[in-house]
Each structure stands twice: as structure tokens, then as C-alpha cells.
Amino acid sequence: MVKKLAKPLPKTQGDGMILKVNEPMSSIKAFFSKPGNIRAVIVFVILAIAIAGSVWLYIFSRTYLRMYRLDMTRDMIPPGAIESIMARTLPALYAMGASAVVLAVISLSFQTIVQSRVLTPSMIGFDSVFVGTQTALVFIFGAGSVLFADPYINYFINAGIMILVSMLMFGFILRSGRNNIIFLLMFGLVLSGIIGSGTRYLQVIMNQSDFFQVQAATSVNINNMNTDIIGIAIPIMAVVVGATVWRHRRYDVMSLGPVQAKSLGIPYEREMTINLIIIAVGMSVATALIGSLTFLGLLAVNSAREIMKTHKHLPLFIASAMMAALALILGEAVRVFFEWAIPVTVIINLVGCVYVFYLILKENKT
């Protein structure tokens, strides 16, 4: 006789709980089984600790370090003095962090669509348009004009003009569905030269007080940022960062090149136009808030590429944003700590220029 097979025991509620517990554990084990993921976690933790330390150093340098240098004790501090300093320090930290993240994210997306590691959105002429707009406002209406003195009006004027210029450039150059990105870069370089020459001419013939006002408004100095408009700028930056990071899988495909991306179903020209519009909005908002930072995104993105050793854009976006925030906050913290008069932008641009030469020589050898 054939023995009947025993019926399997019914699953109990405890078995279901065990399966639910084992599912996330197996996912975690699968995640850490890949060396690239382990590297990413380690890098993110180290960068997070470094950013936290930089924030602490910046706050300490602006508060208690100044008190110690003046030989003041806690009892000698006037009531509300620390709160008053923190009311100016925290908005500056928010502005530096948000601007650094936006510049890093859009720089990575820009390098992906132009297929080059040595180019930045600044080469299209955003920085020159920002400086030229500020100079023209002061030259025509004066430094005391509401168009220049009011932070809200000045912010929207600068952001609006930069977006308008970029949209006109994209509309005329990227028309008829053709990939004219090289011509766009060449046109941007020429535009930067023309606006830069006109800006320098206006700065030479304007009076000295107006010139100093323009220099202060166009230099990255935390004390000169429009911290009053952070409530307007940060939501726009959040939308730009979210829209860019959400498209990270498309960037993975677009990094293969136009031919391969089209063969995989990506409408390359339309995607490129959308990305350039997002980049224009992000650059205009960040530059109008914190000023011109030409090489910050370039340094952050290429440093993230070297550290992460991956072509996937999601970890690169996170690492680039953290690297940019660390560079800007730490640079400003060191400047305040040692009481240097040199702006942090000078240090970043100096290191950025040297790094660009290194990248050019490296790519030339390959």
C-alpha cells in the first residue's frame, strides 16, 4: 500500500512574524554584500561626521571663541547676545548648505548631459549675468535704489533675468530637436566675455562707493547674503534638487551617450532641454542667494566620482551634495576661526583651478 503523504502543518501567526522579520534582514544582508554599497555607507558616515564637526566649529568660532579672545567670562556676556548671534548664524548655515547642495546636484546633471567632467554650468554665463545685473542696477539706479537695496526685489530681479537669459539661449540654440550643446557652450563663453567686459567698464566709471557696494553684493561673503529670503529660496532649491535626484535613473542611461540612450527609449533631446531648464532655475536661485561660486560644483562632483568609484547617479548625487556642503561650511568655519579677511570663494576657486588643470592633464593622457 502506498502511504499517504502527511499534510503540511498550517502556518501559524508566529511563522508569519518570523518571515516578516527575516525579509528586511535578508534585504540588509543583500545590500551589504555588495562592496560598492559598503563603500557608500562608509563615505556617507564620514562626510556626515565631518559636516557636523564643521557646523560646530563655525558656530563656536562666531560665539564663544570671540568671547574668549576678548577675555570675557560667561557672567560678562550681555543678556541675549548669544541668541542674537545665533539668529544670524543659523540662517547663514541654512543658506550655505542649501546653495552647496543645489550647485553640486545641478553640476553633476550638467556634466552628464554634456559628457565632460571639466565643464560646469557657470560656463554658460550664469555668473557673468548675475554680476552684470547687479552692476547695471547700481550704475543706473544707484546703490540706494529699492531695486538693489531691498533683498526681496533684488533677489527676484536677479533670478528672473538669469532664467530669462537662459531660456532665450536654450530656445534659439536648442531648437528643431538638434543637439547643439557644444554650440551652447561656445555661445555661453562668448556671452560671459561680453558681459564681463561691459561689467568691468561700468565698474571703472562708477563712483567708488557704488563700486564697493557692487563688490560686496557679488562676493561670496556670509555676512552679505540675502538671508532674509531664505524662506523663498530654499523651497525652490528643494524642488530643483528633488526633480533632479528623482531622475537619477534617466541620468544613468543618458551618461551612456545620445545613441545608446535613444536606443534604450530615452527621448534624449527632450530630456536634455528639461534638464537645462532645471539647471537654469537652480543656478539662478543659488547664485542670487549666495553669489558666484564657479568651481564648487566641479570640485564636489569630481571628488565624489573619485571616492565613490561608481557611475550610478543616486550615490553620486548624495556624495556630491555632502562634499559641497562640507567644503563651503568648513572653509567658512576655518576663515572665521583664524579671522582671515580673504573670502572663502578665493580659496575654493584657487583649489578648483588647480584641480581643473589636473583633470585636463589626466584626460589628455588617456
Image: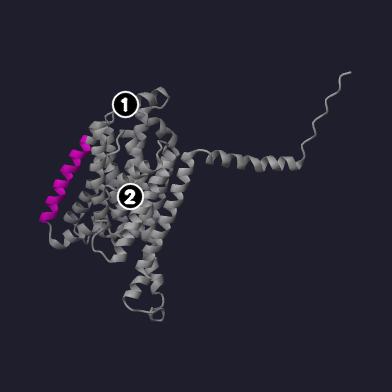
Residue that carries the numbered disc 1 in the rendered image: 177
* Residue 72 to residue 211: above or below: below
Q: Label 2 vs label 1: CA separation?
A: 29 Å
Q: Is residue 26 left or right of residue 337?
A: right
* Residue 204 to residue 278: above or below: below
- Image quarter in which the C terminus is found: top left
The residue drawn where x is 28% and y is 41% is: 120
* Residue 270 to residue 163: above or below: above
Find residue 217 and report its horizontal and vertical position in percent. Answer: 24, 57
Residue that carries the numbered disc 2 in the rendered image: 286
Badge 2 element: helix
Mark toward the viewer: 2 or 1: 2
Find residue 344 and report its horizontal and vertical position in percent. Answer: 27, 57
Q: Which residues are magenta?
A: 186-205
Quadrant location of residue 142?
bottom left
Q: Nearer the viewer, residue 168 or 1?
A: 1
What amino acid type is highlighted by mark number 2?
Ala
